Amino acid sequence: MQRNHYDEDQLAFGDAVRTFIDKEITPHYLEWEAAGLAPRELFTAAGANGFLGMQIPEEYGGGGVADFRFNQVLAEELALAGIGGAGLGLTLHNDICLPYFLHYCTDEQKRRWLPGIASGELITAVAMTEPGAGSDLAGIRTWARPDGDDLIVNGAKTFITNGINADLVITAVRTSDHPHQGLSLVVLERGTPGFERGRNLDKLGLHSQDTAELSFTDVRVPQRNVLGALGAGFLSLVSNLPQERMSLALSSHASARAALNWTVEYVRQRKAFGNPLGALQNTRFELAELATEVDVTQAYLDRCVLALNAGDLTAEDAAKAKWWATELQGRAVDRCLQLHGGYGYMQEYPIARAYADARVSRIYGGATEVMKEIIGRSLKLG
């Protein structure tokens, strides 16, 4: 079925992204995976090529185009190239962190931060998860107490994507005891005394994506670093969740398509019992099912992106996209690895790395069980 989702601008953007990936990422990716970190130069190179801050107004150095299809193109091309770790750092910067700066910054904050976000010189992260609080935002216990014109922040965060590289960390803090109205967002900047990064966490997959523990000990933050109003943090976080979940869904779906593509090519070449694996009925049936699921899911995700552009994407529809696409990714990489046989277990094959990378997709950004709860509540069952 023909896909008419993109116009000429997005198609040209996709060509440029593929060229960038082939030149700047693919030759170095396995080195970054072994090092457990993508270099900061990846962000500045992406910024120089116009792949960061596409929605940032031109006056601040961005693309000035509020069309999430450009973000979708970038997410798809990164995933199709099999570079999930490094790719996640870029999509998190663009899709998940940037909206907070666009929607809640004062004019002074925009002048201070947006140019660096667009150029890649200021790498961003968002810190919500704590050792004792994951999907339940009301359980956040990092405190920010007023002290004159400053806030004094104490607490800890964990599983923070871009945590090692980040210069600006959007941090969810508690400013009162109210479970929801007591949450605020503050931006902690690299080098602030008392703001410490722990180890780069040793994960099952996504090795080139730095994921860190952060700790705050009497960190003095000027109140001019508050994003939005004090006490409005919960609403700010919740309002951005549909776009965050769409970003994760798009990357997961493209990863499933990548697994399908690699496997189709592999079974055409690999022989068993004197014939290509692809000639076996079981292989054809397995890949026919996956090809159908991938294409059907594509249609839903494209509709969701258009709804996001129009401001009509609901939390429930984004939750459907996130849980379905991430579960599809898990099924796809598992079945495709099986069709690779023993070679699928070797790290030199991208399907092996994709298998390890995929597992967390059903956890971060809201676990599958949380997504189903959001959808179930919308049905008003009782």
Image: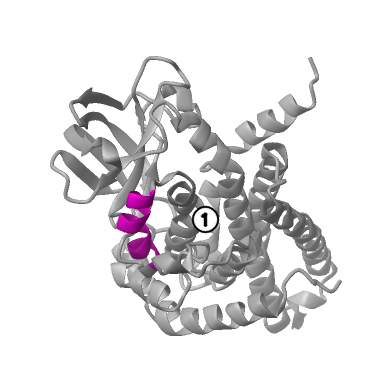
The quarter holding residue 382 reads top right
Where disc 1 sits, the SS reads helix
* Residue at x-position 80% and y-position 19%: 381
* Residue at x-position 62% and y-position 82%: 12
Q: Quadrant of the N terminus?
A: bottom right
The vertical placement of 273 against 256, above or below, is below
What percent of the width, then of the height, locates residue 378? 75, 28
What percent of the width, then of the height, locates residue 6? 72, 72
Q: Which amino acid does label 1 sit on?
A: Asp
* Residue at x-position 19% and y-position 43%: 196
First to last magenta residue range: 107-118
Magenta stretch encompasses residue 108? yes
Question: Which is more toward the observer, 191 or 276?
Answer: 191
Say few, some or many: other residues with alpha carbon within 10 Å of mark 1 (under 14 / 14 to 19 / 20 or more).
Answer: many
| Residue 85 shows in this picture | yes
In the figure, is residue 206 to the left or right of 66? left
**Is the magenta region chiefly helix, strand or loop?**
helix
Q: Name the residue under label 1.
A: 95
